[in-house]
Amino acid sequence: MCALFRLNHVTNQACEGTVKHKTEMVSKLEEKTNQLVSAMKDMEQRLKQAESDKVAAEETARKLGLIIAEKDQKRPQQGDLRLSGPPSGQGACGWARTRDRRIPADLRADSLSTMPPTPHQLERQLLKDYQRLNS
């Protein structure tokens, strides 16, 4: 009976050691799981922010494209007017009246201070906005 008691005691100790080892392994796995869940939440948040930034950048690029297209459309009109002088047979005053009728108000020299920013200025502003969003 004594041998049986010792064998039972040794078996119990071995089982306790195994249970302790398994409990430690479960704790480590739970800790790793929590770390992974936290990392996934952080990555999801960063993805949402990146998607939001992308939408904002696309909207800014769309607006910039419209402004550039508008400027490109106006540029040939301005070039044509600069190249043509007073029509032959008319004095400078007659040409000025014709010019004033042909040039839209937003392109006249007196309204240059209210002109929209140039494409270069818009590009710099877009770059600043993009850098601000990514910092």
Image (cartoon, rainbow, N blue to C red):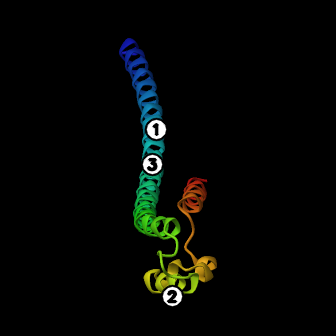
Question: Can you tell which quarter of the image residue 45 is in?
Answer: bottom left
Sort mark 1 into few (<14), some (14-19) or many (20+) by Cα contacts within 10 Å.
few
Question: Tag count in the figure?
Answer: 3
**Disc 1 to disc 3, how far (Cα)?**
16 Å
Estimate the spatial distance between the alpha carbons at disc 1 and disc 2, rounded to whole Å. Answer: 81 Å
Foreground: 96 or 105? 96
- Quadrant into which the N terminus falls: top left
Q: Which residue is nearer to you in this view: 22 or 52?
A: 52
Question: Which residue is rendered at x = 38% and y = 15% of the image?
Answer: 7
Residue that carries the numbered disc 1 in the rendered image: 32
Above/below status of 48 relative to 25: below
Mark carried by residue 44: none
Residue nearest the viewer, comparing 10 with 85:
85
Q: Which residue is mark 3?
A: 43
Tell me which residue sits at (47%, 75%) in the image.
Answer: 87
| Residue at the disc numbered 2 | 97
Relative to 8, is 57 above or below?
Answer: below
Which residue is situated farthest in the top direction here? Answer: 3
Residue 100 image offset from top left, x and y in percent: 50, 85
